[in-house]
Image (tube, grey):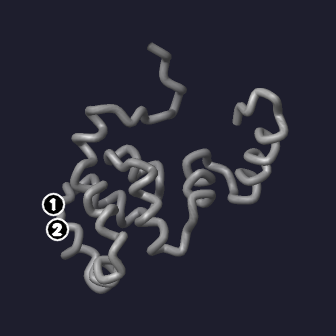
Amino acid sequence: MCSPIPGTVLFDGHQAIKGYALNKMCYSFNDAANRNAFLRDEEAYCARFGLNASQRSAIRSRQVRDLIEAGGNVYYLAKFAGILGLDVQDLGAQQTGMSKDAFKARLLAAAHDETGVL
């Protein structure tokens, strides 16, 4: 078993259960009608999926770290980010506390590094 990286939320069984409603809602954004319904009435849409207070607060914050803490899985959160006009690099930048340009530079540097370590 490997030790966790400081400051990192490990998406394990506990987090999966904790974030089930949030991730289910984000998955629903595969359908354009659902994205539009969310944009029309965000609170009602969150209620429809049974998000708890922590998850609703994380949705309102639009911060990836808050969403992950609330049980979000980055692959499902990417669907939510798309509604906001964000891409996966935006999510990575938020997760690391970096600007998007700095995050992209870090990815490129890791790609050229033999170890591939970010």
Above/below status of 1 relative to 32: above
Kindly identify the residue that appears in the image at 42 percent across and 57 percent down: 77
The residue carrying pointer 1 sits among few (fewer than 14), some (14 to 19) or many (20 or more) residues within 10 Å by Cα, namely: some
Q: Is residue 102 left or right of residue 79?
A: right
Total label count? 2
Residue 18 in the image: x percent, y percent? Answer: 24, 42
The C terminus lies in which quarter of the figure?
A: top right
Q: Answer with the quarter of the image where residue 80 lies.
A: bottom left
Q: Identify the element where label 2 is drawn.
A: helix
Residue 73 in the image: x percent, y percent? Answer: 39, 48
Name the residue tied to disc 1. Answer: 50
Q: As shown in the figure, which amino acid type bears the numbered disc 2? A: Ala
Q: Which mark is residue 35?
A: none
The N terminus lies in which quarter of the figure?
A: top left
Kindly identify the residue that appears in the image at 34 percent across and 32 percent down: 12
Residue 9 in the image: x percent, y percent? Answer: 43, 35
The residue nearer to you, when weighing 46 against 115, is 115
Kindly identify the residue that appears in the image at 33 percent across and 62 percent down: 26
Distance from label 1 to label 2 (Cα)? 5 Å
The residue nearer to you, when weighing 107 against 6, is 107
Q: Answer with the quarter of the image where residue 51 lies.
A: bottom left
Above/below status of 31 relative to 117: below
Name the residue tied to disc 2. Answer: 47
Q: As shown in the figure, which amino acid type bears the numbered disc 1? A: Gly
Kindly identify the residue that appears in the image at 55 percent across and 56 percent down: 91
Residue 11 in the image: x percent, y percent? Answer: 38, 36
Answer yes or no: do the residues labelled 1 and 2 have beta carbons within 8 Å?
yes
Q: In this view, does 92 lie to the left or right of 60?
A: right
Q: Identify the element where label 1 is drawn.
A: loop
Q: In this view, does 21 lie to the left or right of 78?
A: left
The residue carrying pointer 2 sits among few (fewer than 14), some (14 to 19) or many (20 or more) residues within 10 Å by Cα, namely: few
Q: Answer with the quarter of the image where residue 35 lies.
A: bottom left
